[in-house]
Structure formats: C-alpha cells, structure tokens
C-alpha cells in the first residue's frame, strides 16, 4: 500500500490524504482518474459503459467479473462431486468469514459468514443479554436502520427487557456524548450501527466500545454500511460483537450471506439462541442433545448457502487485493468532491446536505434533501442517467464505491441531478427555487 498523497491530515480513521479541492472542473476529474492508484480495479466489475452511472453501491454492489467463473465452477462441483463436495463446502462459512475479517481488521477465527444480517443481529443480541444476567437494559439509536430497531423491540418484548432509544441529530448522527448518560450498571447491551444508513454519519466505534466495556456491558455493532468503506480495526479497538451485510460494499450479490464477528475471548461464554445442527460439536454423531461447538462454529445454525458464499468470496476479493487503506483514501476524495459539488451545483436549486457538517464524521455516502428528491430519483433512472436511491420523505442517497466509481462519474452524476432538479422546478412553475 503506497502512500500516494503525502499531504495528509489526521482524522480518527487515520489520515485524510489527497489533493482535496483540486478537482474543480470535469478535466480535473479526468486527471484525477488518470492518477488514481485504484483505477485498475474498475475492470474487476461488470460495467455497461453505455448504461446509467451508479451511485448505489451501498444498496447493491456491482457484479464482480470473477463471480461468473466461480459460480460455474461450483455448478461443476455440484454436478460431478455431488454430496462428496460437502467436505469442502462445509469450510466456506469460516473461510469466507476470515476473508471478511481482513476487511474488518479482525484476525482469523472471529468471523463466520452466513444467514442474514437480521438473523445474525438476533443471534448476537440474545447471546449478549444471556451473558449479562441481572442487567435488563438495551441501548439503541432511535434513527437506526429499521431491522436493528425492530429486532431489538422484538427481543425486549420477548425477553422482558427495557429498550432505551437515544435520540440523535438525523444528519449529524450519534456521538459518544449522546450515550454517556444512558449507559450504566443496568445496561446489558448497546447495539448501534457503525455508519448510519441514511445520513452516512460514522460512529466512533472504538470510543463507544470502550465506554460500553467500562460499564461492563456488551457492544454489538451493525457494520452493514461501514464494512468495505472504513478502515475498520476491530482487533485494535477490542470490539465485542459485530454483524453486517454481504451484498452492499462487499459486492456479494443480491441476498448474499451476511457475516458475524465475535471477539476471540468472548466466544466460549456466548450462547446464541438458535440451536441448529451446524452449531453442534459433533454434528454427524446426531446425538440426543445440543452441545455447542468451541469457537465460531457455535454461531452457525443450519446448512450454509454455498452459492451465496461462493459469490461473496468473489465480491470481497477485489477489496482484499486493493487494501482498505487506499479504498478509504479514495472514498474520502470522492465524498469530498461529491459534497463540494452538492453545495455548488445543487445548493442553488434548493438541495441541502443531510449528512454530517464535519467531513471527518462522514463515511462512504452522502444524503441530500430536496422536495423533489423522489421524482428526481425516478426520472434519473427512467432516463438512464444515474441510479441513486431515495429515502422517505425527501432524501436522495449518493454512494460512490472506490473500486469502481470514477471522479468523473461523480462530476457527471451531479450534473445530471442538477438538470433534473432544474427541469422539475420549471415544470412546476417555480423557476429556480431557493
Ligand atoms: C442493509 C442493512 C441491513 C439489512 O439486513 P438484512 O437482514 O440483510 O435484510 C441490516 N442492517 C443495516 C444497518 C443495514 O444497512
């Protein structure tokens, strides 16, 4: 990993590198692409150069080129080796988990891939509560992704715990100070997202984890919008528990398996609530009662999705080849460019940034609010200009992905969005709104 941009400034995620503010024209954007050390990775993905631009990698990552070959090989194994291939396939949850672990800054033996993020959240949240008897409070973020809120509501109701939801500023996101007064000796579990799905605000995961540990509670982070973007350091932070998606920045494909992480020294003392045969110590003894495996195997449930895991392995491969430090360095550049363009080109058309005002608190996507955001998102897709995503009531999410989004794509996307906003304003008889 070479240090391409030595003029760094420090952030809590490491060093913010690069010629911030240098891209001031489409020509500059093209030059930045020529100098981009990650440019070669664009070719690792299937991209229709005539198709719409894509700022939606936080919903569904693009298709890695290698996935077709990997799945074809798997079909061959299924056809030729039949059930005997299970010996190899059975290792996939741990193998692919360890690869995801490299993206999380986690040493091998702490991550398994499988099930969905929702199910993994349930498993680890219940396991954490079970490990903190006598404490009855769960702390969560009122603005968190729906599945996080719903799973915690369900658990609180089923197990008779108190769910405390912390209010935070929707654009700025949750900060450590919001939590300080809430976490105490009754807290069993603190469950938060590493990056807010809507605003793209980044939580100070290390600091939150420390706060939670000082209260002798357990921290569970949903890193669905963080993994594959931020240079996460779960081992260095001593993070307790985490889960996340496989189909967003990890490019695993629609419905790809999720993953879960449990710090090494916690594994032995945690019991997840779905006692399936894949978590069983001597699986094929088919014994009368459940006896959880040692290590990460105990967090498995049933038969793994072999096709999904194969696809996920192809999805994380380009990230592993590129390294998270350059990926994060370029992400910051793209986000800085995007934020500047939103302000300059969309601001006069009535758009507002709905993401943290402080650049060091931003992760891999930005939210832009505008009264016409819904219609504009639709028109941009219909006209095959750029695919962005809309969140109720008025937010457009813009998510570049460092491995395949070019600086010029960001530049042109904002141009398209600006012209659609301007057209809508004219059509509605508002001219250029403020
Ligand atoms: C996308 C996302 C999920 C998705 O969960 P699934 O079980 O895969 O549907 C969960 N949590 C967060 C924070 C997300 O952003």
Image (cartoon, rainbow, N blue to C red):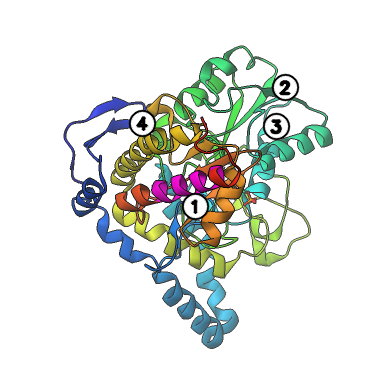
Label pair 1/3, CB-CB below 8 angstroms: no
Q: Counting other residues with Cα less than 10 Å from the Cα at mark 3, is it few (<14), some (14-19), or many (20 or more)?
A: many
Give the magenta part as a residue range.
413-425
Label pair 1/4, CB-CB below 8 angstroms: no
Gap between marks 4 and 3 measured at Cα: 30 Å
Residue 418 magenta-highlighted:
yes
Gap between marks 2 and 3 measured at Cα: 8 Å
Quick one: label 4 or label 3, which is nearer the N terminus? 4
Quick one: label 1 or label 4, which is nearer the N terminus? 4
For the question of whether residue 91 can be seen, the reply is no
Vertical placement of 87 versus 42: above or below?
below
Q: Quadrant of residue 391?
A: top right
Query: Is the CB atom of the residue marked by disc 4 within 8 angstroms of ligand 1's nearest atom?
Result: no
Q: Nearer the viewer, mark 4 or mark 3?
A: 4
Question: Foreground residue, 403 or 272?
Answer: 403
Q: For mark 4, what is the residue?
A: 13
For the question of whether residue 111 can be seen, the reply is yes
Q: For mark 3, what is the residue?
A: 129
Under circle 4, the secondary element is: loop
Gap between marks 1 and 4 measured at Cα: 23 Å
Q: Of helix, strand and loop, which mostly describes the magenta segment?
A: helix
Q: Counting other residues with Cα less than 10 Å from the Cα at mark 2, is it few (<14), some (14-19), or many (20 or more)?
A: some
Quick one: label 2 or label 1, which is nearer the N terminus? 1
> Where residue 4 sits in the image (x, y, percent)?
18, 43
Q: For mark 1, what is the residue?
A: 56
> Where residue 57 sits in the image (x, y, percent)?
47, 53
Q: Counting other residues with Cα less than 10 Å from the Cα at mark 4, is it few (<14), some (14-19), or many (20 or more)?
A: some
Q: Nearer the viewer, mark 2 or mark 1?
A: 1
Q: Nearer the viewer, mark 2 or mark 4?
A: 4
């Amino acid at each position: 990993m070479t240090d391409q941009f030595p003029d760094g400034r420090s952030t809590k995620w490491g060093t913010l590198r690069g010629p911030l503010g240098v891209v001031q024209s489409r020509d500059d954007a093209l030059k930045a692409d020529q100098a981009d050390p990650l440019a070669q990775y664009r070719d690792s993905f299937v991209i229709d150069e005539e198709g719409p631009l894509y700022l939606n990698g936080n919903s569904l990552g693009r298709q890695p080129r290698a996935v077709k070959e990997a799945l074809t090989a798997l079909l061959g194994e299924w056809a030729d080796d039949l059930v005997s291939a299970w010996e190899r396939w059975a290792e996939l949850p741990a193998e692919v988990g360890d690869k995801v672990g490299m993206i999380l800054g986690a040493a091998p033996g702490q991550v398994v891939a499988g099930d969905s993020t929702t199910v993994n959240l349930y498993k680890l949240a219940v396991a954490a509560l079970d490990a903190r008897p006598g404490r009855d409070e769960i702390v969560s973020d009122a603005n968190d992704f729906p599945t996080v809120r719903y799973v915690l509501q369900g658990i609180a109701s089923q197990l008779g715990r108190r769910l405390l939801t912390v209010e935070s500023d929707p654009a700025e996101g949750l900060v450590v100070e919001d939590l300080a007064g809430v976490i105490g000796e009754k807290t069993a579990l603190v469950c938060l997202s590493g990056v807010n799905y809507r605003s793209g605000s980044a939580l100070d995961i290390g600091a939150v984890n420390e706060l939670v540990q000082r209260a002798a509670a357990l921290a569970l982070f949903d890193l669905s919008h963080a993994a594959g973007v931020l240079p996460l350091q779960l081992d260095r932070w001593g993070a307790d528990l985490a889960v996340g998606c496989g189909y967003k920045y990890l490019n695993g494909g629609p419905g790809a398996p999720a993953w879960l992480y449990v710090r090494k020294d916690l594994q032995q003392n945690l019991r997840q609530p779905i006692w399936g045969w894949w978590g069983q110590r001597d699986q094929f003894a088919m014994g009368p009662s459940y006896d959880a495996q040692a290590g990460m195997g105990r967090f498995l449930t049933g038969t793994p999705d072999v096709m999904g895991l194969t696809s996920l392995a192809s999805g994380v491969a380009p990230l592993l080849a590129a390294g998270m430090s350059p990926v994060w360095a370029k992400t910051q550049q793209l986000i800085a460019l995007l934020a500047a363009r939103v302000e300059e080109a969309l601001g006069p058309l009535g758009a507002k940034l709905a993401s943290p005002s402080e650049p060091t608190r931003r992760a891999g996507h930005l939210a832009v609010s505008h009264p016409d955001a819904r219609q504009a998102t639709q028109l941009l897709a219909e006209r095959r200009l750029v695919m962005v995503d809309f969140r109720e009531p008025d937010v457009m999410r813009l998510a570049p992905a460092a491995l395949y989004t070019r600086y010029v794509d960001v530049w042109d996307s904002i141009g398209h969005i600006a012209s659609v906003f301007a057209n809508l304003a004219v059509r509605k008889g508002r001219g250029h709104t403020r």
